[in-house]
Image (cartoon, rainbow, N blue to C red):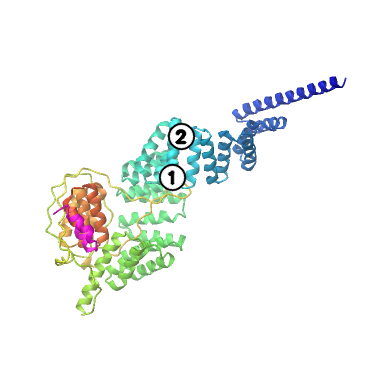
Amino acid sequence: MRSSALTACMCLAAGAIFAADHRSERALKEGLRLEAANQFGPAEQSFTEAIAQDPNEPVAYMHRGHVRLITGRAQEAMADANAAIGLLSKSPEPFELRAQILLKLDQPGEAVKDYDRAIELGLDTAAGYNGRAAAEMALGRTRDAIRDYSRGIKLRLDDPEPIQHRGDAYLKLERYRDAIDDYNQVLNLKPDSGTYQNRGFAHGQLGNFPQAIADFDRTLAMDPTNARTLTYRGAAHLKNDEPAKAVDDFTAAMKLTPTDVYLYLARAAALVKLGKHQEALADREEAVRLRPDYAEAYVARGGSYHQMGRHEEGLKDRTRAIELNPNLPEAWFARGSAYFLLGDYVKSQPDLEQAIKLRPDYAEAADVLAKTNEKLTAIHAEADLPAKPAAAPVAPAGPEPPEEPKAVARIAPPPPGPAPAKEPVPRRSPASASPAEPERPQQPKAVARIAPAPPAPAKEPAQPPPPVPETVERPPAPAAVRPRPVATGSAAEHEARGRALTAEGNFPAAIAELGEAIQLKPGLATAYNARGYAYLRARNLKAAISDLDQAIKLDPAYSNAYRNRAAARKAAGDAAGAAEDEKHWR
């Protein structure tokens, strides 16, 4: 009798379990159907019912966690993901879900760990790799992110979003051509205003300003009130020597963002090119009013004051810029170059030295400092006072005329830096090797000028920051030391002018001309050799060696460059390096 009763109870229990399992399965299926239909509220109720019927159902926890994540309840989603991991510790899906939640909670480091675990357990999906890439981007691990985006893209070629993100990563690394390739793919799949904008930005950094402007035009056709794009297009017009159009774009952007200091500084730079110095000053004054703690605004306004002959006010502004940001090399250079052009070489020297200390590769400041030291040496000599010792001068050989260049597209260069008039050629020093005048260049081909790139944004990798306008303007040079203007033309024409200026002893102007040649044709070894030679004559040995290194890198058999570098290394105290270079030209 007892046995019969026990058997009956067991049967009833088994039936109850079966019924509960059946109800749990039915609720789970209903939840999945509702989730697929984006009916997230009812779906969550069904998953909760499934869990109530079977607390050990991991799929219900995972999908309820996913629904809660989508509806903005990340902490509740985290509890579900942890429960699913407890039930399915050897399955990749719960770890992937928790990684998504951690990324939403701004914990990218922990998210990467969960993505790593999921991939170790066999996750091999586009979503998995793209998710880990997003976490790596948040951590600043851009190259790792590119690797993972590439894996995800291979697994799904028709999804434009990861291709867009990889393009943004390339943009952050300043790999502009790779970024353009990705943006081209995205635009083929799904035209988007943001992609046109970023592609235009990349074109601008490569100096392809007409292409950049065309992309910005497309962006504004889709989004006419995009202040960022108006700003970018204005900067491109300015670089493309279209200052009037730049003014129009900056003005339109100001109407949308009237307190953006950058716009006032940028429009002022365009107004200066138009010769409207009073209007430029007004914009710079407004920039100072909007941001009285912004050192760059004072540097720019000081430039306007000097341009208008108000030198005392200009020096005061640049001093204020240094007080606000003593680590800004442009502020020290601006004041130092102003002192130089006003003939106050004693005050110019420490300012220029500080600019170079803050930025050791500041070639322009080094050029003006070399001129300042020469002026002080001459003054001391005339007064019969002891002067600072200078490096032994290096005597050059006679220049060779360059070949007649082919015609290429005219590209407007930036304004030249301050350069004194012709300096005397130093006497030959027996202690140093004689550098050879750079050899004549080969016929050039048309190459677009490359513009410097601005820094990538910290919080918006998909939105590059606007390019900073040139705020350091020099006061008008006195008649005796006014620099030569840099003319436009081909790379070979710039190189030829640079060689002629070097022969005259006007090294800063020569360096500026040769820099234009390099910007127009970055692979021109003869231009690097010529500029390295000019730096050598100006006794800027570090810059000379850097340029000569590049010339030899571009043309390993360039004996003339080896000879010049041997002279520069010997002057810098590197006897072993000089001896090694001498093997290549003797």
Q: How many marks can you see?
A: 2
Query: In the image shown, does 180 or 26 lie closer to the viewer?
Result: 26
- Asked if the residues shown at circle 2 and circle 1 are in contact, with their CB atoms under 8 angstroms apart, the answer is no
Whether residue 370 is situated above or below residue 549 in the rendered picture: below
Among numbered discs 2 and 1, the one appearing first in the sequence = 1
Question: Which residue lies under the disc numbered 2?
Answer: 152
**Camera-nearest residue between 7 and 146:** 7
Where disc 1 sits, the SS reads helix
- Residue depicted at 53% across the width and 38% down the height: 117
Residue 39 placement, left or right of 368: right
Q: Is residue 206 left or right of residue 374?
A: right
Is disc 2 placed on a helix, strand or loop? Answer: helix
Name the residue beneath numbered marker 1: 142
Horizontal arrangement in the rendering, residue 447 relative to residue 457 (left or right) = left
Residue 344 visible in the displayed image: no
Considering only vertical position in the picture, is 21 above or below 485? above
Residue type pointed to by label 1: Thr
Q: Which amino acid, by three-letter code, is at mark 2?
A: Gly
Vertical position of residue 64 compared to residue 495: above or below: above
Query: Where residue 159 sits in the image (x, y, percent)?
Result: 46, 32
Q: Which residues are magenta?
A: 565-586
